[in-house]
Image (cartoon, grey):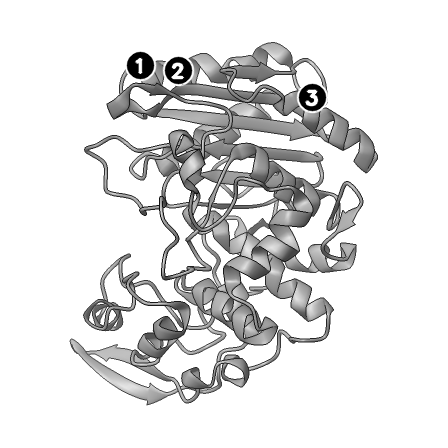
Amino acid sequence: MKPASAFRLVIIAALAGCAAQTQTQTGRGGLDAARLERIEPTVRADVERGRIPGAVMLVARDGQVLMHKALGQQDAAKGVAMRTDSIFRIYSMTKPIVSVAAMMLVEEGRLQLSDPVSQHIPELKGLRVGVEKGGALEIVPAVREPTVQDLMRHTSGFTYGVFGKSLVKDIYTKNGIDASDHDNAEFVKKLATAPLMYQPGTTWEYGRSTDVLGHLIERVSGQPLDRFLEERIFGPLGMKDTGFFVPAEKHSRIAEPFAADPKMLEVREKPKYLAGGQGLVSTAADYLRFAQMLLNGGELEGRRLLARKTVGYMTADHLGAIRGPAPGYGFGLGFAVRLADGQAANPGSAGDYNWAGFGGTYFWVDPKERLVAIWMMQSTAQRNYYRGLYRDMVYGAMMN
């Protein structure tokens, strides 16, 4: 790994002149230049066919930015070209950031992963579990309370009402839990009106766990979530374009989906709900700084956010025998964690970790290969396809 100062020089050089359409440093870092460059015509052809509006792609290895390209349209309806500094709704790529924030409080002794969630959010005391039997919902006692660790590894029993169908999810919809017209404290009060989907600690269920974690950070720190993240993560890392909304002077850089696609979060004004699970906007360059900090073991350019052992702990599998999010993957504290070189449908290394966003964004970190890769677009329908395509083609360029 290069020294922090050297990494800083590389990033400055690579990101200078962000209005330029492409910035590329290939043929270094053990990636074959021609193979890496063939990603561009593949994606550009899809843009020209109207499959996606556009995308920003960034690959870094050993702290060197080997590819940073903007393709297609930032806003197809207005004919605005994509920029390398276009701002994207990153949805669930918010979760790793909020998980890091929680672990900072753990390191400071203000929080423990074994704490019951209700210790910090009393409104969530005494939650029960909904069990479907014969088309009816039976409400049974929880064997134990969900813990902070359950929130971070998605074994709390909280769910999303908007994905899939169940009688518990119907209650989420009826009670407005998936809405955004509440603040964080009001959100957990609504959440307390619904039963858990599963017994805590038994099942990986993707849901509102990190939204709860965001409010828990507020209770423990005494600060609103946006202020805590700005002071403790975004400011120290120089993530100047990351937050819960886009200020007016940056509106011209907001990436938009096609008009026919599902409507995405409105990000031009500060929201009432600071959703720790899906509320942030960011750029590829900003998210690189966050991911590189993780790859560096918790430090970037002399600013340490977490201890090396804490990062290693977060990016280890915490599910054990519990089934994870996809074949070949477990889950750590905020990330999907690859369990083996094989098993998964796309290449990678045992120990690499990733997460993605509903709006089409995706990142992964491969510690074995000292690699960070980031994909940014705004297309919900195409999100799964490009996660796999991008991974295939990046690893297809790796020669040593």
At 50% from the left and 74% from the top, the residue drawn is: 201
Crowd around label 1: few <14 · some 14–19 · many ≥20 (10 Å): few
- Answer with the quarter of the image where residue 113 lies: bottom right
The percent coordinates of residue 202 (x first, y second) are 47, 73
SS at circle 3 = helix
Q: How many marks?
A: 3
Of marks 2 and 3, which one's residue comes earlier in the chain? 3
Q: Nearer the viewer, mark 3 or mark 1?
A: 3
SS at circle 2 = helix
Label pair 2/1, CB-CB below 8 angstroms:
yes
Label pair 3/1, CB-CB below 8 angstroms:
no
Residue bearing the label numbered 1: 48
Residue 334 seen in the figure: no
The percent coordinates of residue 84 (x first, y second) are 50, 24
Of marks 3 and 1, which one's residue comes earlier in the chain? 3
SS at circle 1 = helix
At 44% from the left and 69% from the top, the residue drawn is: 203
Residue bearing the label numbered 2: 44
At 62% from the left and 40% from the top, the residue drawn is: 365
Q: Nearer the viewer, residue 341 or 44?
A: 44
Residue bearing the label numbered 3: 13
At 60% from the left and 42% from the top, the residue drawn is: 239
